[in-house]
Amino acid sequence: MKLFGLQLPEFGKRDPREAARREASRREAARAPANRSRGRTQFNLRGRLLLVGGALGLCSFALLARALDLQVIDNEFYQKQGAARFLREIPIATSRGMITDRNGEPLAVSSPVESIWANPQELLKSPARLPQLADALGMDRDELKNRLSQRADKEFVYLKRRINPDEAKAILALEIPGVASQREYRRFYPQGEAIAHVLGFTNIDDRGQEGLELAFDDWLRGTPGAKRVIRDRRGRIVENVDLVRAAQPGRDLTLSIDRRIQYLAHRELRNALTQFDATSGSAVVLDVATGEVLAMVNLPTFNPNSVGTSARDAHRNRAVTDLFEPGSTMKPLTVAAGLEAGVISPASMFNTNPGWIANGRYRTTDTHNYGVLDTTGVIRKSSNVGAAMIAKRLGNQQFYDFVRRFGYGERTGSGFPGESAGVFPAPDRWDGTSKQTMSYGYALSVTPLQIAAAYAALGNGGKLTPPSFIKGQHAPSRQVLDPKIAAEVLHMMQTVTEPGGTATQAAILGYHVAGKTGTSRKASAGGYSRRYIGYFAGLVPVEHPRFAMAVMVNDPDPSKGYVGGTVSAPVFRNVMEGALRLMDVSPDNLDTWLAAQAEAEAKRLKATGRALPVTATTAVDASTPTARAAQ
Amino acid sequence: MNRYVILAVLVLANVATALLVVRDRHEHRLAFIALNKLDKTRDELNIEFGRLQLEQATWAESNRVDQVARARLGMVFPRTEDIVVLRR
């Protein structure tokens, strides 16, 4: 009804013209009753109300259904969204395992540091505090501003990484909005450069990059844990909600290295390099019975606590990565090969006249004409000609197989990253002169570690043990030479350090030392130059050898000395003397010690004859503790 | 009748377990806070230990010991003639 009442005047409005008005209203009046009667029959209040009510009901049902769907049936989505707004899963930093030497002395320790980070969106809202922050960080003000505005749309930027926790506390105390700190771990190497090459170093994320840090990264590295926390807008943790994963700290690693021997080797090698103006050097000390590496040093070295400042070249562990021609240190192997094949005996005589022997169109020469030498003499005098004569009696394959058994031409199995296998080609790639030149250590290349391992095999009754950097973890050794022949060769090598040998400077009072010098000329374009590598490799004490050591001094100044017996032998002696004392190895040559003592006693008596007797007693008192150690 | 008893028991059980869940969650949270606190203490002790070890190792650094012994304490290595060998 009402609808119609409203409709009627509207018709009138639609027809505003005065002239047509009456006509129109008359017509309207005639039509209206018909309209009205049609409306009455079609209009159904109940039906319409039901329709409207039904539609509204459906709407609210849809809303309810949706609400049910969201809150009960499929409630995950919004819960997730809600959680994403304030719940955070944050990592729990874990420390890397400690590396210790064989006596438990720490060599690499992870210590916590703080990294300051900021939320640029938050921080840029209070620009007035930026200068203050820059000063606290020790950064340039403009630089800080640039850095932040470049990352204005980000929520995270490191401001300063790995700083002292106290320093971090001072910065946080400024309470600048959007600035927070995060704990990280940094590696410290208290032994510094003495052991830098063996340990290697880690990168800023505490992952091993070189050396044993890299080789044992999985072992040392912990698994970071995770916990769920509620964080407020400024990134502060309001509440710890749950532990997702517990942090698994890294495991400790006990190396076979002895810190004291390592230091000794480092010091002595450094002294030798300074004295002879050499460019680089390496030294390796192995425990003969187990193959454990007791010391491994290289020069030049670097400070592992600030790796960035050092030359890349100094990072290399030359003792395992660099290849050199072994020179005369090869001769004991040549002799052993001859003895094993039965082509020579210890009593064989070699006529090395006139001090050279032809090798194809080249010559193998000795530094002097040694005349007739026995097998021992070949080693004692280090006669190239003698070694060449032994090799002549051996077949190519025979010689190759023998030397190969000692591990030349293949990795030692130490597991050190980047270890070289050496260069020792098979006989089918030899030319006519190869075997002869190899017999005295040219035309093949090895690492200092390989030399030390091969010598350790000679001292270990012919058993070659792969070197190991881990205390108590040894790979099985293999018999590469008859123990009897190994002992024979060892006694021949003993003459090298005795009067008349090439390395009298390697002799140690109270001990028999077996060793071999080596002086190899460095290959350069088109031949061998007047530049040298001085070697000494040896074993001590000869009865039951404990240590095998190889020393290599590269490129000494020839005017100051270059022969292995001069540049490298003293390093060997000084280090071994210390190692024997540190490891309580009993002397096997007490007689010389007693003789030296008697001589000293005689001198002292002569001195006390002139001086007061009191001096004599104090001298004896002062020496008592050391004497006890020598028992 | 019987059905209503079962229903009542179930409702009660439901309410009871709901309350227990609430209690356990609360206890879990408290325990977690305690755990965090202990973890923190442990970490701090570990860190302190690590620092002390580091400090000790720095003082005992071979090079330093060598230099202190020679320069400050005036120690020398015994010469051959200073060593007396005793035999038993």
Image (cartoon, coloured by chain):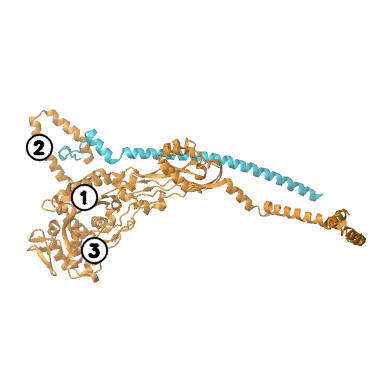
Cα gap from disc 1 to disc 2, whole angstroms: 28 Å
Relative horizontal placement of residue A286, taking residue A43 as reference (left or right) = left
| Percent of width and height locating residue A331 | 18, 60
| Percent of width and height locating residue A443 | 20, 64
Q: Colour of chain A?
A: orange
Above or below, A573 relative to B52: below
| Percent of width and height locating residue A242 | 56, 45
Chain label for disc 2: A
Report which residue position mark 3 lands on.
A403
Q: Secondary structure at mark 3?
A: helix
Cα gap from disc 1 to disc 3, whole angstroms: 24 Å
Q: Identify residue type, mark 3.
A: Val
Report which residue position mark 2 lands on.
A602
Residues beneath discs 3 and 2 located on the same chain: yes
Q: Secondary structure at mark 1?
A: loop
Chain label for disc 1: A
Q: Colour of chain B?
A: cyan
Above or below, A170 relative to A243: above
